[in-house]
Structure formats: C-alpha cells, structure tokens
Amino acid sequence: MPEPLIVAMLGVGAMLALVAGTAEVIDGAQRAQRRRLREFVAMPLARDGEPGARLSSLPSRIAFAVGRPAVGLWPFALGPEAMHAAAVEVGAATIGFVIGGISAALFAGPNLAALGAAGGALVGLLAPRIAWSRARGRQRRNVIAALPNTLDLMALAADAGLGFDAALAQVVPRLDGPLAAELRRVLVELRIGRDRRLALRELARRTALPETARMTNAIIQADALGLPLTRTFRELASEIRVRRRQLAEEQARTAPIKMLFPMVLLIFPALFVVILGPAVITVVEALHVGP
C-alpha cells in the first residue's frame, strides 16, 4: 500500500478520534438524562420497523456509534428520533467513505481512491434511508392488519364499563407488534399527564395512516360529545375491515396487468426458444444442405 495512502488513513482516524473525544466532553453531562428518558419512553418501542428499531441490527449500531460523536457537535437541538437517524446516516456515510476509498485504492489504483470514497459515502448515506423506507412500509401494513382486532378488544373493554384510559391499559398488554408499541406510548403519555387529544393526534402523526387518523378523530369526537365508545370502536373496526377488503379486491384486479410485463419479457422468450428452436435448426440445416 502506498505511503501517502497510509498517512491519509491515519489522519482520518486521528480526526475521528478527536471528534469523538470532543463530543464526549461536550455531551457527557446530559447523556445520563437522555438515556433515562429513552428507557422510559422510546426503548419499549424498539421492535422491527418501529421507532428505536433502527438500532436493533448490528450494522445500525455500528453506524450509530461512529456517527453519534459528529451529531453531538451539531449546534441545533435534535429530538431522539432525529438524532438517531442523523447519527446512523453520518456513521454509514463515514464507513462507506473509508471502505470505498480503501477498496478503490487497492483494486483500481490510488488515482481512483477519491472517486471510490465518494461513491462509498453516497451508498452509505442512501442505504439507511432505503432500509427505513422498507421498514416503515412493513410497519404500516402491520398496523393496518392489527387495527380491527385491537378496536374489537377496546369495544369489549368499553362495554364492560371501562373508560378509554382503563380500556387501553387492559388491551395493550395483550397485544404485540407496531400498533401495540404505539398504543403503549400513548398510554405512557397519558399516565405522565399529557392531554388525551394531543396524545391521540401525535399517534396519528407518527403512524401517518388514514385509518389511524380516522380512529383518533372519532375517539376525540366521541369524547367531546359524550358518545358511547363501544359503538365508536365497533363502527371503526367494521369500516377498516371493509376498506381492507376493497383494497384487496383492487390489488387482485391489477394483478393480471402486473403479470403481463414479466410474461412478455421473461416467459414468452423462453417458450419461443423451446417451441421454435428445433424448427429453426431444422430449417437452417435444410437450407445449407448442398446438391
């Protein structure tokens, strides 16, 4: 390996160590307080595809550890979710920068080290965003699938004479998945004294689903007008099931159109080769037969 490249790598490592040490000194006083807050509110949500799940895999934890010192020096205040996302993106970009530069220098020559480092940084920056987008899509599907049964359980608890807070406290321990984590967070916020309307609207904002928005609006309206929660929960569950059925029928109608492209591009050429191949070979041999 060329000596200038070794010197550059040592310089980058020393700079990262200096940034990490500076961030440790600046951020050390408030770290314990933020850790206790995350353990009380955010960490129970750390499941697949949920807030906090971005630290569940080993690559995410490594990227977070690398990028957190740099994010700690950011002059503007960041929330826990924004800090996690920024730290993972910065860490992944840094790791991609180093790996891309070293790989390009070893396999393509020192002249392409800068290009490889830039490409690695871009890949490292985009990879967490793509992974989070897929996780959010999976979380949205899981929330929609679990919402009708959850509303049925809430209706049963309300029918037994429980209020919204008590019904939520009875239902949440019996659930699992992204929706259970979000409802658990709502329950924690209600227990520490947050207004019910604000907690429900924040739930709708976090999930960003029309179904949860309709659910929160219906609960807030029923609470304001004094309507029975049992009827509200059952109507919402029925409406969501009808909507899911309509979406499934719509996807079934579009399935033949989606299947057309792989059939034309992949299946039909193979069939043509199998069916017409022997005939073409026979014709070519007949044309080349001499007198």
Image (cartoon, helix red, strand yellow):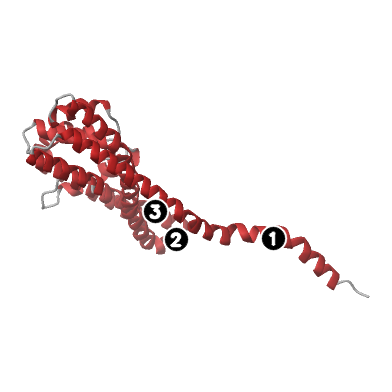
Cα distance between the residues tagged 1 and 2: 44 Å
- Residue 91 sits above or below residue 40 on the image: below
Residue at position x 34%, y 42% in the image: 59
Question: Left or right: where does residue 91 sit relative to residue 232?
Answer: right
Question: Left or right: where does residue 60 sit relative to residue 168?
Answer: right
- Graded by Cα atoms within 10 Å as few (under 14), some (14 to 19) or many (20 or more), the crowding at tag 3 reads many
Q: How many marks?
A: 3
Q: Are marks 2 and 3 in contact (CB under 8 Å)?
A: no
Question: Left or right: where does residue 47 sit relative to residue 158?
Answer: right
Instruction: State the residue in front, 235 or 286.
Output: 235
Q: Which sits earlier in the primary sequence, circle 2 or circle 3?
A: 3
* Label 2 sits on residue: 109
Q: Are marks 3 and 1 in contact (CB under 8 Å)?
A: no
- Could you tell me residue 222's position as x and y percent? 12, 40
Q: Are marks 1 and 2 in contact (CB under 8 Å)?
A: no
- Could you tell me residue 88's position as x and y percent? 27, 47
Cα distance between the residues tagged 2 and 3: 10 Å
SS state under label 1: helix
Q: Which sits earlier in the primary sequence, circle 3 or circle 1?
A: 3
Q: Which mark is residue 273?
A: 1
* Label 3 sits on residue: 102
Disc 1 residue type (three-letter): Val
